[in-house]
Amino acid sequence: MRAKQTDPQILSPAAPGFWRSPLRGPWLTALLGLVLLAGITVLVVTGLLSYAAYNPDLAAVNDKTPGKGLLGFYLFAWPTRPHWLYRLTQGVHVTLGVVLVPVLLAKLWSVVPKLFALPPIRSVAHALERISLLLLVGGVLFEFATGLLNVQLDYLFPGSFYTLHFYGAWVFTAAFAAHVALRLPAAVRVLRERGLRAPLREPAVRRQEPPTDDTGSGLVSPRPAPMTLSRRGLLGLVGGGSLLLFAVTAGQSTGGPLRRLALLAPHGGAEPGRGPNGFQINKTAALAGIGSPDTGDGWRLEIRGPGGSVRLTRAELLRLPQHGALLPIACVEGWSTPDQSWQGVRLRDLAALVGARERPPGVLVRSLQRHGSFRQAALRDNQVRDPRSLLALRVNGADLSPDHGYPARIIVPAAPGVLNTKWVASLTFGEL
Ligand code: HEM
Ligand SMILES: Nc1nc2c(c(=O)[nH]1)N[C@H]1C(S)=C(S)[C@@H](COP(=O)(O)O)O[C@H]1N2
Ligand SMILES: [Mo]
């Protein structure tokens, strides 16, 4: 007891002897690392696609990321087909992000002795490595924290997580790329040498002396504790955790029988109930401050364009040619609805009413809503031109419900839900 208390080998987390799990070692770290490499690469790509899908370069109203500057170098016109594109990319981003949490925690656990290693800095090269590790570990924790808060807290803090998550993604991605370049060769070598299965089948190490498989990694404990869990058991725990998270998350994007299991899905807004308007509601009319005085008989849609402006009642809109489109709502928070059958007036037909018949331009959409986020959104010309882009008046054969945007809302194929403005007050076609 006495010896233990005075032995720095045991007391300080910086001492190699402090960390005693016999499971740590280069093989485990390499395996978890490769799983994360695949998963995080998909997260980076789908995340950057999500940013492009906002049309952030189009008008100040869409983007809440001030001074993104060079970071927007890759932006492109987000396509309108396939119509489930954003439903897929953002469903993957959020579901995969949630599912990777146990893998990430296990990976961090597997390298924790290295994070505490002393002295913290031995040389300039070592200092650079430590800084890159700080950006890597800090960055990944930051991205997961802001991402999960974004999904769970929804719009409690409009805008803030979104901006932080975007800048954080670039910092993290740079550190991640450097880390992969430095460590991938060693990880591949360990897995090649030892195989994927053999280390799982090895009998539990019961000896209390240091194992012989350390390749100077500093991961293997010099004084391992007796084994309480096999490697197979640990990986089973991690995989089982991921599987469970998948089961309670994926349904918010896939629909079908999994939807009822989607316990982690945001339940904000209201219970959508049954019937034609019985699909997920993001922000209710009451929350948005929209009441019947605004949306009753006095409501007019204001349309402006290069050839002038017109004001139309809902009855007049219903007398224009009506078209249908089967499209989902796919929220940036990852949840989505199956395709709904929308009916209304094509955006390009409305553009034609105000002098933009040939090559209709983009449009700025404003809502009746006076406070909060998503009151307005800019759509690109390719979105206005798509024949399935509608000012929707009805859904699944019934009038829109107040919560889904009555008297009129936007619906655009393949776009993030946030661009589908509800309770539309005006459309301005032209320069954005
Ligand atoms: C290393 C990991 C990650 C990277 C590099 C990454 C990257 C990105 C990027 C670049 C965007 C677009 C910009 C933005 O909307 O802020 C984005 C959006 C988003 N990400 Fe991630 N992400 C990661 C992990 C996660 C995780 C773990 C979750 C949650 C499970 C998550 C949830 C979201 C959400 C909800 C959005 C949409 C935010 C919004 O538009 O309001 N992300 N991500
Ligand atoms: N005016 C207004 N339009 C809005 C929103 C909003 O808060 N206000 N939320 C947007 C978001 S983020 C989504 S995901 C969709 C959700 O549409 P739904 O509630 O009909 O499912 O509406 C979009 N249109
Ligand atoms: Mo959304």
Image (cartoon, helix red, strand yellow):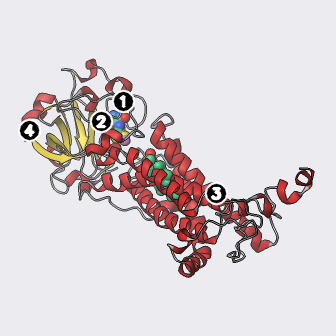
* Residue kind at label 3, given as amino acid type: Trp
Q: How many neighbours does mark 3 have within 10 angstroms: few (below 14), some (14-19), or many (20 or more)?
A: few
- The residue carrying mark 4 is 320
Instruction: Kindly check if marks 1 and 2 are in contact, taking CB atoms under 8 A apart as contact.
Output: yes
Task: Kindly report the distance in space between the C-alpha atoms of the residues bearing marks 4 and 1.
Answer: 32 Å
* Residue kind at label 4, given as amino acid type: Leu
Q: Which mark is residue 280?
A: 2
Task: Kindly report the distance in space between the C-alpha atoms of the residues bearing marks 2 and 4.
Answer: 29 Å
Instruction: Kindly check if marks 1 and 3 are in contact, taking CB atoms under 8 A apart as contact.
Output: no
* Residue kind at label 1, given as amino acid type: Gly
Q: Earlier in the sequence, mark 2 or mark 3?
A: 3
Task: Kindly report the distance in space between the C-alpha atoms of the residues bearing marks 1 and 2.
Answer: 8 Å
> Quick one: SS at disc 2?
loop
Tell which residue pokes out farthest to the top in this image: 293
Of 316 and 100, nearer the camera is 100
At a point 73% along the width and 70% down the height, the residue shown is 218
At a point 56% along the width and 57% down the height, the residue shown is 104
Quarter holding residue 261:
top left
- The residue carrying mark 3 is 109
Q: Which mark is residue 269?
A: 1
Label 1 within 8 A of ligand 2 by Cβ: yes
Residue 341 position (above or below residue 165):
above
Task: Kindly report the distance in space between the C-alpha atoms of the residues bearing marks 2 and 3.
Answer: 38 Å
Label 4 within 8 A of ligand 2 by Cβ: no
> Quick one: SS at disc 4?
loop
User: Given this view, does label 2 or label 4 mark the residue nearer the observer?
Assistant: 2
User: Given this view, does label 3 or label 4 mark the residue nearer the observer?
Assistant: 3
> Quick one: SS at disc 1?
loop
User: Could you tell me residue 396's position as x and y percent?
Assistant: 14, 37
